[in-house]
Amino acid sequence: MRITRALRLGIGFLALAAVASGCTSGSSGTATQNAAGGKLTIGIKFDQPGLGLEMKNGTFSGFDVDVATYVAGKLGVKPSNITFREAPSAERETLIQNGAVDMVVASYSITDQRKKKVDFAGPYYIAGQSLLVRADNNSVTGPQSLGGKKLCTVKGSTSAQDIQQDFAHDVNLQEYDTYSLCVEALKNNMVDAVTTDNIILAGYVAQNPGQLKLVGTPFTTERYGIGLRRGDKESRDKVNDAVQAMLDDNGPTGWRAALQKNFGPAFPVPTVPQIDRY
Ligand code: GLU
């Protein structure tokens, strides 16, 4: 009787500890090991049209999703064996560090600060921070014109950090959890502008025809990498090889085709990024 109770308590404690550490479906293997076992869990955005978007039928679409699927394929994992998990900006490092995901492909800029916690393959795309306003707004023209304005961005993003460091002045900065919440606030007149990478903002313009517009020229360089467990060089090398293959691939699932599929045939395909095998 006593033993059973102690056991039950013990199991309850372990379950609680697992929840408290945020370790839910996390596996202990490396990305390479898990791929060899036939499965990968990949962190993406669920609310960024063109990049990572959860569809009504439960499938996912976007350039990041296509990059993730291509890389997984090169590691031997079929699309049906990929589990996509939402990776909001502020949670990306933690999800990688605690093993909840094998990798993150989520408009994730490679930075020295983040490299203290995770490693990056890539870059597979180069974006730049920009500004989104309502179509009828003519007072916001660039980062210098934000004085006294309400500006929305996302916690844990480089967009929040850069605007605070370089352009904070007298901007009224509002930090939300996701960009789609910022866009809702913009449409409801609760903020004057949204700032993040141009490619993310372009997706919201396309989703809200005639209502929103991008202004000014990009004022940062955001090199999108694939986040991986720090120190797992084997996986980083393999993912870099896979990204290189996608960049070189002129077929229907290659890099150019994936960009045009997600951003339209008129999308100006940028210069091909150079992989940084640091
Ligand atoms: N690329 C920037 C970053 O990694 C902004 C986009 C995002 O938050 O996903 O923080």
Image (spheres, grey):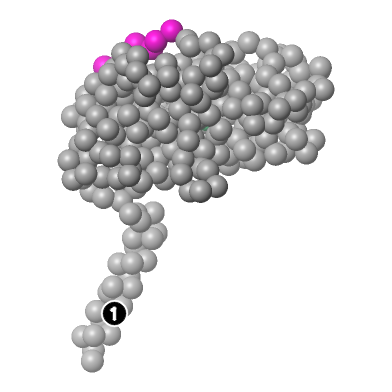
| Part of the protein shown in magenta | 271-278
Q: Main secondary structure of the magenta part?
A: loop
Q: Is residue 33 above or below residue 128?
A: below
Neighbor class of circle 1 (other Cα within 10 Å; few <14, some 14-19, many 20+) is few
Total numbered badges shown on the rendered structure: 1
Label 1: which secondary element: helix
At x 40%, y 44%, the residue is 84
In the picture, measured across the screen, residue 166 lies left or right of residue 43, that is right
In front of the other: 255 or 123: 255
At x 53%, y 29%, the residue is 50
Q: Say if residue 172 shows up in the picture.
A: no
In the picture, the quarter occupied by the C terminus is top left
274 is within the stretch colored magenta: yes
Q: Give the residue at mark 1.
A: 8
Give the image location of residue 23, x and y in percent.
34, 54
Q: Say if residue 39 shows up in the picture.
A: yes
Residue lying at the far bottom of the rendered structure = 1
Give the residue type at disc 1: Arg
